[in-house]
Image (cartoon, rainbow, N blue to C red):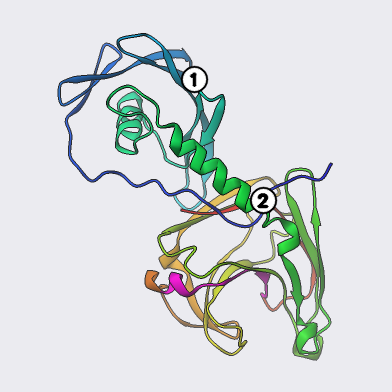
Amino acid sequence: MKSDKLFAIIVLFMTATGISQNIELIDNIAYVDGTKYIKLEKINRKKILIRNVDSDEKLVEITFFRVYNSREKRHLKIPSIYYYGINESMRFENHIKNKLDLVKFLYRNKIIFLTGKPNENKVFNHLDNIEKMKTKNISSWRVVNDNVMGGLSSSTLTEKENSVLFKGTTSLENNGGFASIRTLIEKGSLKDCKTMSIRYKSSSTNRTFGVSFKTSQRYYIPYHKFTFTPKTNDWEELTVNIEDFKHYKISKIIGNNMPLNLLEEVFNIALIVSDKKEGDFDIEIDYIKFN
């Protein structure tokens, strides 16, 4: 069976309320401004159960995963939350340092209300977004190589069980030298995003890849791109600030720092290899996310 792997954009907006509250954790009971909020129960070193303080009802179970952020050069502990009432799970990209940090995360992001009731609508909205994104699977990406300008590079995009594989050969003949896969998105989709994360593995540790944003179909109009080089043959996760995308014109840097207000105009995203080298390349992608 073909996978519905979401190789495109997974956007999770996690915005705090911006209101300052006094949040405390005393004997595994969390308090917000002196009011009992939730009870924490450790299952093991990776799981914490959250209960209602009054009824002792199971609300959510939180499983922590360790991911390596190559930009910050450290491991992050991110939560996946299982909601008992609706038998659904939702994974977040927020780094949780300790129990108190977890309580603040649950309250300020309205995952559990002060009344002790889980915010199930957040999960339903998330699942609705996933269903919409399933229509944007591998078939929405197209291969674009330098042959559109007379070059001789070649590449393919193949769907695997839980990932996609982009591989090929670049040639510098006929002033060529690039291969890419590209997809179209609705303008405004990225307007509130500030970071990009990509999980990948590649045997091409001598090649440089890039993720680019375009606001025009014309090839000579400047665009923004972030480049990276695989360090190992194993899975790596890279998280970068979108402001760190550089300004390019026909593969040459012409400026620094992408203004975030330009994100509203982005309609084309590409994964590209254009490092002025000949030879084979490969990169397997688990996901690309924008937060």
Q: Three-letter amino acid code at disc 2? A: Lys
Tell me if residue 196 is in the magenta stretch: no
Sequence-first disc among 2 and 1 = 1
Q: Could you classify mark 1 by the number of other residues whose Cα lies within 10 Å: few (under 14), some (14-19), or many (20 or more)? A: some
Badge 2 crowding class, 10 Å Cα cut-off, few under 14, some 14 to 19, many 20 or more, is some
Mark number for residue 238? none
* Image height of 107 relative to 211, above or below: above
Q: Which mark is residue 47?
A: 1
Instruction: Using the numbered discs, state the Cα–Cα distance from disc 2 to disc 1 in whole angstroms.
Output: 29 Å
Q: Is residue 196 above or below residue 87?
A: below
- In which quarter of the view is residue 261 placed? bottom left
User: Which quadrant: the N terminus?
Assistant: top right
Q: Label 2's element?
A: helix
Identified at 72% across, 46% down, the residue is 4
The answer to whether residue 70 is seen in the rendering is yes
Magenta region, residue range: 262-274
The kind of residue on which mark 1 rests is Lys
* Residue at 34% from the left image edge and 39% from the top image edge: 109
Q: Secondary structure at mark 1?
A: strand
What residue does disc 2 label? 134
Q: What's the residue at 19%, 42% (across, down)?
A: 19
Q: In the drawing, does residue 74 fall left or right of residue 56?
A: right
User: Image height check: is 51 above or below 158?
Assistant: above
In the image: residue 96, left or right of residue 88? left
Q: Depth check: 183 or 277 in front?
A: 183
